[in-house]
Amino acid sequence: MVAFEPKIVAFCCYYCAYSAADLAGSLRLQYPANIRVIEMPCSGKTDIRVLLQAFEEGADGVCVLGCMEGDCHFLKGNFRAKHRVEQAKKILDDTGIGGERLEMYNLSAAMGPRFAEIAREFTDRIRQLGPSPLKPPAAVTPEKTSPGQGANL
């Protein structure tokens, strides 16, 4: 049996979180390769619809990474993002997907090691939760039989 490896989408603010992810790479810090980083002009531009669409398109977990609270380049973008993540978590809970599959983190551009740590911790969390309920169960393949033998029913 193949171990479950979650698909995770990370929406990262260009000014801080994306720079932290870049720093983590420059420092050659190890973090799971199953995280897809999407650069955003500001975490506040991450709409609820986009967060939910990531799950519809196969993500097992989604995180939004923005500037430190109070240090947003667009003044209140990270507060807007936090509010939208909270609303989306409620929708995910109400629909049975689970709000724990979505999280918001705040980073500065100098926090490359923290980005790698968040990536590992969030991946472990999603791995423990298992595949998204939106994904169809794994297809069951019938046993192969040799010529002249019937399937064992």
Image (cartoon, rainbow, N blue to C red):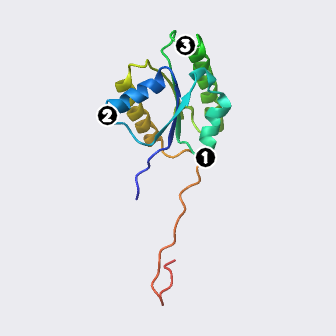
Say if 3 sits above or below 90 in the image. below
Q: CA distance from mark 3 to mark 2?
A: 27 Å
Q: Position of residue 150 (x, y in %)?
A: 50, 85
Q: Which residue is mark 1?
A: 134
Q: Amino acid at mark 1?
A: Leu
Q: Position of residue 116 (x, y in %)?
A: 37, 30
Q: Nearer the viewer, residue 3 or 69?
A: 69
Disc 3 marks which residue?
Answer: 73
Q: Are marks 3 and 1 in contact (CB under 8 Å)?
A: no
Q: Secondary structure at mark 1?
A: loop
SS for dot 2: loop
Q: Residue at x 48, y 41 (%)?
A: 129
Residue most extreme to the bottom: 148
As shown in the figure, which amino acid type bears the numbered disc 3? His
Callout 2 touching callout 1 (CB < 8 Å): no
Query: Mark 2 = which residue?
Result: 28
Q: Residue visible at 54% across and 13% down?
A: 72
